[in-house]
Image: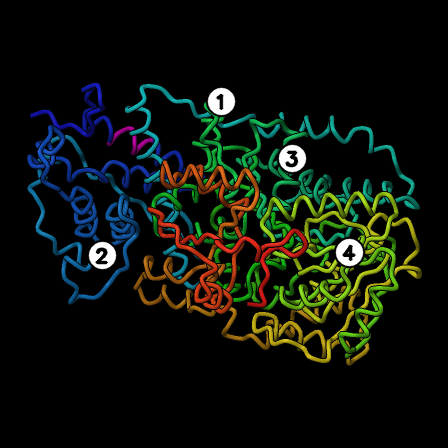
Amino acid sequence: MEYLAHLNENGKEQMLFEHLKNTAVLSGNFADSFGAYEWGYCCGILHDIGKYSIKFQERLHGKEEKVDHSTAGAKVCWEQKGAYQFLSYCIAGHHAGLPDTGGVSDTSAQGTMLGRLKKKLEDYQAFAQEIEIPKLKNLPFQPVKGENLDFCASMLIRMIYSCLVDADYIDTELFMNGESIRDSGEPMERLYEKLESYISGWMDNHDLNTINGRRTEILQHCIKKGEGDKGLFRLTVPTGGGKTISSLAFALKHAKEHHMERIIYVIPYTSIIEQNAKIFTDILGKDNVLECHYAVDYELNEELKSMQLATENWDKPVIVTTNVQFFESLFSNKPSKCRKLHNMTNSVIIFDEAQMIPNDYLKPCIAALEQLIRYYHSSIVLCTATQPALKKLLSSEIKITELCVRMDEQFSFFKRVSIKNLNKIMQSELIQRLELENQVLCILNTKKRVQSIYQSIKGEGVYHLSTSMYPVHRKKVLDEIRERLKKQEKCIVVSTSLVEAGVDLDFETVYRQLAGVDSIIQAAGRCNREGKRTDTECFTYIFKLDQQEFVQVQRQQMEVTESLLEENRNLEELNTINKYFEMLYHFRGDNLDKKGIMEKFRKGNFQFAGAAREFKLIEDTSKTVFVPKEEEAQKILTQIKTKGFTKELVRQMGHYCVNIDENDFKKMYASGMLGEMTADTKEEYFVLKSLEKYTQEMGLILDV
């Protein structure tokens, strides 16, 4: 009997042995990047042996009956014992997701590894006529002394799983389509040549009394450091020091030097992603840079089909993505998210604004990064002006190399503002101060406080900015603000923290409500940004309000900052920033792994599904409200009513949506302001019926 793996819509057949062999070689090649070819090959050759059953073959030819074809290979590996059992998880989960180990009393219905092994399977023994179980050597690496062996093993399983599912998808896609339209981009050597051409005009500037001369000094040092060994690096550069180009230059040089596969930029905000991706595209070409986050959709353009395919497995030389995408993929158990993991190996991974890795998950995130450095041949760069104090969270043998030359001196040179503490003031005093300013930014901790203060001072040249405004609205207001600043006209902006990173604004004065030291320094970066005035003329004022609202998320950050201010410490000094993070991490203690992710991989018990459920970087209990105020938004609403929800319409909707917290939602819903929109997705959407509650000045009015 001839056994088939697939039939395409034209009736073309793919032989099962051919699919297994193709997947095995491809999976093995992927795993070879971390010395595990045999493991990847073994996983690939056994993953679909359940298709050697008569019932599965009948199903391929049209019978409706469901057949479990994934458990067979898992069972064979489990019976081989030893290292083969790691592969059981990969094979069992190559469609449904990596399972939890489970307990000995689990039944087949529970979906755990031990439960799955009890399943009664169709006879698949015909596999032995075509397939020989490969011999597995030892582990592809020797774990270091003191390593958490279970977490180490869980990462290896994830990586082999990634190799398997990507290989399986690619071979199936190739058979179904008859050809591949994937494009992996240009080699690192060529990309480095493009960078050299781009920066060639800068390299002769050695005048350290100029901003450009300083930027060139930092850039040249980063390129030189790129020749060094792989490992963990920091790039601690002050605002205006040119860290985007310098970090790219280090990464390209380092990747070229060590024959590394790709560069992955991990960024906390989509606003910064769009800026950085444009810079990288201008330098390296659009076919070499992949943006991978919720706001980008390559699907609609046939020319960009290869980019859409690359979002699935990150097969491009430069990836620009978010913290959420990167870390949630690392801790996911689903094939669609885990496909890309093997392409994180042998890469330069750069974390822009590294202090934004969420504290609630800091321990598991750092543990995963250590694994990538130790066993998967990657280098990691932590890039920010406010470096988190990670030394105590890292293993003793992991050393950090600083990439910024004469760091303290650079911070002195780029100092553009003086930070002053006003302590506690009345809201009325803050309003009086703002009204006396010409160009001032005031950043507050809550949207309601922003609306309250804006209401008190609104008028010509006064602007409100917050996420109570949908993205298209915010962009229009930001464009107007930039225009006024450029013309030196009066411009008073009252905003939430959304302007602190990635928004290129330059004010004479900044007011920042008490927050974490890193937030205050980010806010200060919007003051005298272009360096046109001296630091003695430009001030960032920190203040507490007489009626300080309770902000649970920021409470510890505020308390630590306050204690440093009471010691009369200069918040801009590097040792103060380090002290801030040390104190913050000390106070948080076990809450640096709030969901106990590390405990889910202990004593040979792997909770892949459990960890994936718990590991959510953004705990979002907010509700999404669509505001059909503009003509374009009304068109989208009409299309949804006629066509229903499509992926593209949901993406377009996002430009006109506001997220509101549960309390505000309940009040608005109870007052009849919101209507439900039925979607065929897990997301819930609501439409604003009372459009008068959304104004051009403040967006969605929150005082219901």
**Labels 2 & 3 near each other (Cβ < 8 A):** no
- Mainly helix, strand or loop, the magenta region? helix
Q: CA distance from mark 2 to mark 3?
A: 45 Å
Please give the label number shown on residue 462. 4
Q: CA distance from mark 4 to mark 2?
A: 61 Å
Q: Viewer-proximal residue, 423 or 519? A: 423
Q: Which residue does the numbered mark 1 point to in the structure image?
A: 303
Q: Of callouts 2 and 1, which one flags the residue occurring earlier in the amino acid sequence? A: 2
Q: Helix or strand or loop: what does disc 4 sit on? A: strand
**Mark 4 neighbour class, 10 Å CA radius: few under 14, some 14 to 19, many 20 or more:** some
Q: Which residue does the numbered mark 3 point to in the structure image?
A: 278
Please provide percent x and percent y for residue 672: 44, 62
User: Which circle, 1 or 4, is nearer the viewer?
Assistant: 4
User: Which amino acid does the dot numbered 1 rest on?
Assistant: Glu
Instruction: Using residue 165 as the reference point, say whether residue 302 is left or right of it.
Output: right
**Quarter of the image holding residue 12?**
top left
Q: Compared with residue 199, is residue 694 higher up or lower down, i.e. above or below?
A: below
**Quarter of the image holding residue 341?**
top left
Q: Which residues are magenta?
A: 20-25
Please provide percent x and percent y for residue 247: 68, 43
Q: Of callouts 2 and 3, which one flags the residue occurring earlier in the amino acid sequence? A: 2
**Labels 1 & 4 near each other (Cβ < 8 A):** no
Q: Viewer-proximal residue, 343 or 632? A: 632
**Mark 3 neighbour class, 10 Å CA radius: few under 14, some 14 to 19, many 20 or more:** some
